Image (cartoon, rainbow, N blue to C red):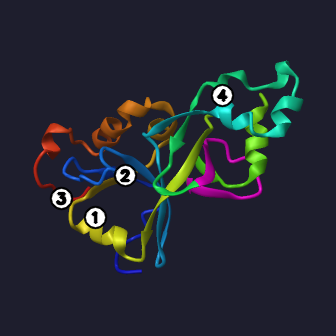
Amino acid sequence: MSDFPSLAGQLLIAMPALDDPHFENTVTLICEHNEHGAMGLTINRPLELTHGEVFEQIAAFDELPDARRNQQKIAEPVLQGGPVSLERGFVLHRDRGNWEATLDVAEGIYVTLSRDVLDAMLSVDGPTDATMALGYAGWEAEQLEEEIKSNAWLTTPATPAIVFDAPFDDRWDHATQAIGVTREQLSGPAGHA
């Protein structure tokens, strides 16, 4: 990797001038970043698909008694994690848990790629503050670094408050406020945080 530090655990905030329809006004959690490239999940683009619709495709949900089903999760939207591999699912969650394929992204922010976390989410005993994402954002080696140098993105450390607590529509503003800037201040060319 270049002299750029790893951005894993950072939020990428799309600059207002970024006109790529895949990333316009997005906040993307960087899950991995190394000499081979970067992978992240966009956290402020809910789909019309709900957790319940995904759960219906999992046979184990029908086998759970109603009292054991996590009714709160059913209506929550699934996130569009990014434009790459839209059939691939990820679960963002606050509890570390003990699932098969979990990546520690930042303090209190984990991503699991294995089916066992979905089975846990079905139940009231599943992880708290968990949401599904379909697809991911990916960058080739040094591509993300070049985009940052060309002022396409600002970065700020990811926090559970932004990732899990802020409403989807407010996450961009919360992320920029975390670095002390507003949308109005970013209307022209800007530097990096």
Q: Secondary structure at mark 2?
A: loop
| Drawn side of residue 176 relative to residue 107, left or right | left
Foreground mark, 1 or 3, reads 1
State whether residue 4 appears in this view. Answer: yes
The answer to whether residue 107 shows anywhere in this view is no
Labelled disc at residue 22:
2
- Would you identify the image quadrant in which residue 77 lies? top right
The residue at which mark 1 appears reads as 148
Label 3, residues with CA under 10 Å away: few <14, some 14-19, many ≥20 = few
Query: Residue extending furthest left?
Result: 188
Report crowding for label 4: few under 14, some 14 to 19, many 20 or more residues within 10 A (C-alpha). Answer: many
**Vertical arrangement, residue 40 with respect to residue 1, above or below:** above
Q: Position of residue 69 (x, y in %)?
A: 79, 25
- Callout 2 crowding tier (Cα within 10 Å): few <14, some 14–19, many ≥20: some
**Mark 2 residue type:** His
Give percent across and percent down for residue 35. Answer: 46, 79
Q: Which residue is mark 4?
A: 73
Report, in whole angstroms, how far the alpha carbon at label 3 lies from the one at label 2: 22 Å
Structural crowding at the residue carrying mark 1, measured as other residues with C-alpha within 10 Å and reported as few (<14), some (14–19) or many (≥20): some
Which residues are the magenta region?
Answer: 87-105
Give, as a three-letter code, the residue at label 1.
Ile
Query: Of label 1 and label 3, which has the lower sequence position?
Result: 1
Residue 102's place in the image compared with 71, above or below, is below
The mark nearer the N terminus, 1 or 2, is: 2
Which residue appears farthest toward the top when viewing the image?
67
> What's the mark number on residue 60?
none
- Mark 4 vs mark 1: which is more N-terminal? 4
Q: Is residue 102 left or right of residue 145?
A: right
